[in-house]
Structure formats: structure tokens, C-alpha cells
Amino acid sequence: MPRTSRNPRLETVEPIGKRVLIRKDEDKKITKVGIHLPDRLEIPTITGRVVAISAEVAKDDNYPIEQYDRVLFNPKHGVPVDFEGDNRLFVIPIEDIVAV
């Protein structure tokens, strides 16, 4: 049976509406004082870097957010995106970003 080669497809995720795509920072495994935590006790993070911004957010001057900004966000309404296999991408409504 002949082998078929698959060309890798470049995929992108572009948020629509008043949303941004965020890469969540990794959960902390070491406390500020240097104590190593077991996997089940990791400190959950709600910070991340903005990967992409919807056109609607980019045009609106009320939202001073740009690509690569580090943000603090509420993950409650976030939609996880299984795009790169690390499960750290989330589409977040702009209202859930609480600090830049």
C-alpha cells in the first residue's frame, strides 16, 4: 500500500466579537519561598499572555489591550481551545479581563 504524505496544515484561531485569545501561564509548582509542591497541590494561575485580539476589540478605544500583553483574567466564561496540545489556550470575553 503506498504511503501518502500529509502536508502539515497551518491553523490559526482568531477570536470573534468582544473576545481575546490567551495562553494561560503554567500553574506554579514552586512557592515564592522555594517550596516544591506536589502535582496535586499546584497553585492555579489566572494570568496569561494575549495571543490574538478580535477585530472588534482592536478597534475599540475603551479596551487598552494589545497582543502580547500579560493579563489577569477570570477563567469562568473562558472556552478552552485544544489547538497545540498543551491545553493552555483560552478564548476569553473581554469583560473577563480584570487587569493588564
Image: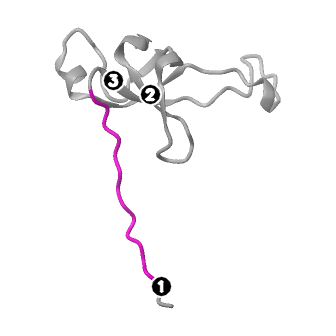
Eye-nearest disc, 1 or 2: 1
- One can see residue 41 in this view: yes
- One can see residue 99 in this view: no
Q: Is residue 8 magenta?
A: yes
Of the image marks 2 and 3, the number of the one nearer the N terminus? 3
**Badges 1 and 2: C-beta atoms under 8 Å apart?**
no
Of the image marks 1 and 3, the number of the one nearer the N terminus? 1
Eye-nearest disc, 2 or 3: 3
Query: In 3D space, how far apart are the residues under numbered discs 2 and 3 (Cα atoms)?
Result: 14 Å
Which residue occupies 35% across, 41% down?
Answer: 13
Q: For residue 100, which quarter of the picture?
A: top left
Q: Is residue 42 left or right of residue 65?
A: right
Query: Where does label 2 land, which residue?
Result: 49
Answer above or below: position of 12 versus 38: below
Q: Secondary structure at mark 2?
A: strand
**Dot 2: within a 10 Å radius of its alpha carbon, few (fewer than 14), some, or many (20 or more) residues?**
some
Query: Where does label 1 land, which residue?
Result: 3
**Dot 3: within a 10 Å radius of its alpha carbon, few (fewer than 14), some, or many (20 or more) residues?**
many
Which residue occupies 53% across, 35% down?
Answer: 88
Of the image marks 1 and 2, the number of the one nearer the N terminus? 1
**Badges 2 and 3: C-beta atoms under 8 Å apart?**
no
**Badges 1 and 3: C-beta atoms under 8 Å apart?**
no
Which residue occupies 31% across, 37% down?
Answer: 14
Answer above or below: position of 2 versus 85: below
Kind of residue sitting beneath label 3: Arg
Q: Is residue 34 left or right of residue 12?
A: right
Give the residues drawn in magenta, as a range. Answer: 3-16
**Dot 1: within a 10 Å radius of its alpha carbon, few (fewer than 14), some, or many (20 or more) residues?**
few
Query: In 3D space, how far apart are the residues under numbered discs 1 and 2 (Cα atoms)?
Result: 40 Å
Query: Where does label 3 land, which residue?
Result: 19
